Amino acid sequence: VLYSFLPHKEVRFIFPALPIFNMVSGVAIAKIERYSLKSNFGKAFLLMTILGLLLSFFVACLFLLISKKNYPGGWGLLYTNEHILNRQNQDPDMNLIDLVHIGTYAAMTGVTRYLQLPIESGVAYSKVEDEHIRMAVCAINSPFTYAIMDKEYYSKLSKQCNANGYETLRIFGGEPKLRLNGKTIIKIELEPVLFILHRNISLRQRYLESLKNKDEGE
């Protein structure tokens, strides 16, 4: 059961060696403890062993926290699904099939079929990597109601997306880096890497009305 929670299963290759490592480590620690009281060097070595174990535990917890930030695609898809379900609950009579575009970066960082909603819920997903389709995600005749877009394409298409009624719901960070905040506090910094977009019909209508008013004013 615990093994199923691992996002990556490569660690299974070292599982056969773990009992041997634990046995050797246990023997070494037992000998250190047995001889530690006989000399000051032994006591110091025992203290260093304990500190080493505590440091190893701290580093493991730190890297576990960092690795959790390496899957913005998965978090982005969960957020998108939640937004779709909330919108459907608010307007259950809306007969609309939501089509979600999943960008390449999102697909590489945590998006799986297990996170996708069933087709019966009125949601479909697309991972097509064709350049023409990706550049037309926010087009006026685009079939996508949601888009999980990486920063490269967002920088290219943000103006078009805004003009065609797509609003940025949330930005997810990734590519974590450790920084020292001051002298003692370690801070995890994230770069904005994923943008969750949703086509808002009212925004599109307001944009067209503003263009119409502008033309009439001229």
Image (cartoon, helix red, strand yellow):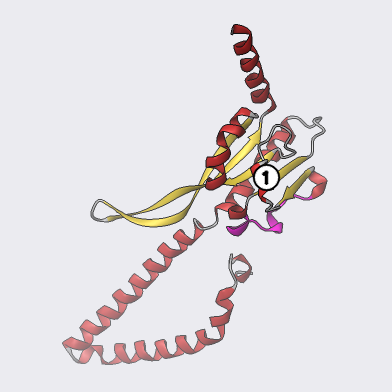
Residue bearing the label numbered 1:
81
Q: Quadrant of the C terminus?
A: top right
The residue sitting at 58% across, 58% down in the picture is 109
Point out the image quarter for the N terminus.
Answer: bottom right
User: Picture coordinates of residue 51 (x, y %)?
Assistant: 29, 74
Residue 214 occupies quadrant: top right
Instruction: Confirm whether the magenta stretch covers residue 115.
Output: yes
Q: Amino acid at mark 1?
A: Asn
Residue 1 vertical position relative to residue 92 in the rendered view, above or below:
below
Q: Residue 3's spot in the image, x, y percent?
A: 61, 71
Residue found at the far left of this picture: 40
Closer to the camera in the image, 29 or 104: 104
- Where, by quadrant of the figure, is residue 122 drawn? top right
Residue beneath the point at 57% across and 74% down = 10
118 relative to 60, above or below: above
Picture coordinates of residue 34 (x, y %)?
30, 91
Of 70 and 52, the residue lying toward us? 70
Residue span colored magenta: 107-118
Q: In which quarter of the view is residue 53 placed?
A: bottom left
In the rendered view, tell whether residue 189 sits above or below residue 41: above
Q: Is residue 18 left or right of residue 149?
A: left
- Residue 155 in the figure: left or right of residue 209: left
Q: Is residue 99 magenta?
A: no
Count residues near mark 1 (Cα–Cα under 10 Å), then give few for <14, some for 14-19, many for 20+: some
User: Extreme top residue here?
Assistant: 217
Q: Residue at x 39, y 91 (%)?
A: 27
Is 52 drawn above or below residue 204 in the view shown?
below
Residue 137: image x %, image y %? Answer: 67, 41
